[in-house]
Amino acid sequence: MEIQNYAQTTFETCLAVNLLQLTEKKISKKEELNTINYAMNFSKDNFTIGHLDFMAKNHNLGLDFYVDNKWFLAFINKFKFSNKIDVIHKKIDLNLINDRIKISPAIVYLDSFALWKITHAPHFIIVIQPTKYGYKIYDPWDGKIKTISSDTLSKGIINLRNLLKYCPQLIQKK
């Protein structure tokens, strides 16, 4: 998979841009906004599943959607979404990430404070591959590929779960 040098154009389109990276088609602002608009109209109760449904239906993507807790799994499974999406309950941690990125890059939900040290907010990135000292990632906020430490990635996931009280998630193209 080749990552495009594309920065998200709105505050809320990190997941849309990451998912569009998986299509390997040229990313445009129009398609970025189409993705989030569909997701926002899909449900006010969950931000992620609408994005995935859009990608499955409009880009023919099969997706594995890993969620970190059983309550969230049951909640997600109440939605009607494409059968190209498999929802899987697994603890989201470095072990799962290391296992999954052997196959292909994975979108991971984390607390952005781990990356930028500015404010705590949920954010999606793509973990591309392991490096000697951590991970090569794509951050849609600035559209750049960078390297982060294993500790940074782990803290981002832990803070998302424990501080922000969001369910960690991992998304991967089948």
Image (cartoon, rainbow, N blue to C red):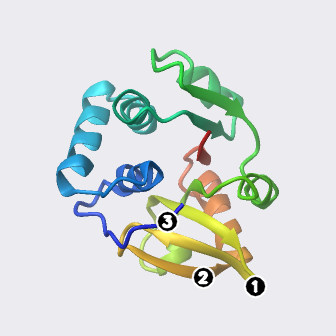
Q: Residue at x 49, y 65 (%)?
A: 2
The residue under label 3 is which amino acid type?
Glu
SS of the residue at dot 3? Answer: loop
The residue under label 1 is which amino acid type?
Tyr
Q: CA distance from mark 1 to mark 3?
A: 22 Å
For the question of whether residue 52 can be seen, the reply is yes
The reply to whether discs 3 and 2 touch (Cβ–Cβ < 8 Å) is no
The residue under label 2 is which amino acid type?
Thr
SS of the residue at dot 1? Answer: loop
Task: Tell me: residue 84, above or below residue 153.
Answer: above
Q: Residue at x 47, y 17 (%)?
A: 79
Task: Tell me: residue 62, above or below residue 141.
Answer: above
Among numbered discs 1 and 3, the one appearing first in the sequence: 3
Q: Tell me the crowding category of disc 2: few under 14, some 14 to 19, or many 20 or more residues within 10 angstroms, Cα based.
A: some
Instruction: Report the quarter where the N terminus lies.
Output: bottom right
Q: Tell me the crowding category of disc 3: few under 14, some 14 to 19, or many 20 or more residues within 10 angstroms, Cα based.
A: few
Task: Tell me: residue 91, above or below residue 54.
Answer: below
Give how far across and how far down residue 30 sits, in percent.
17, 50
Q: Residue at x 22, y 38 (%)?
A: 37
Q: Nearer the viewer, mark 3 or mark 2?
A: 3
Instruction: Give the numbered dot on residue 133.
Output: 1
Give how far across and how far down residue 38 sits, in percent.
26, 33
SS of the residue at dot 2? Answer: strand
For the question of whether residue 155 can be seen, the reply is no
Residue in front for this viewpoint, 113 or 93: 93
Among numbered discs 2 and 1, the one appearing first in the sequence: 1
Q: What residue does disc 2 label?
A: 147
Q: Residue at x 61, y 58 (%)?
A: 105
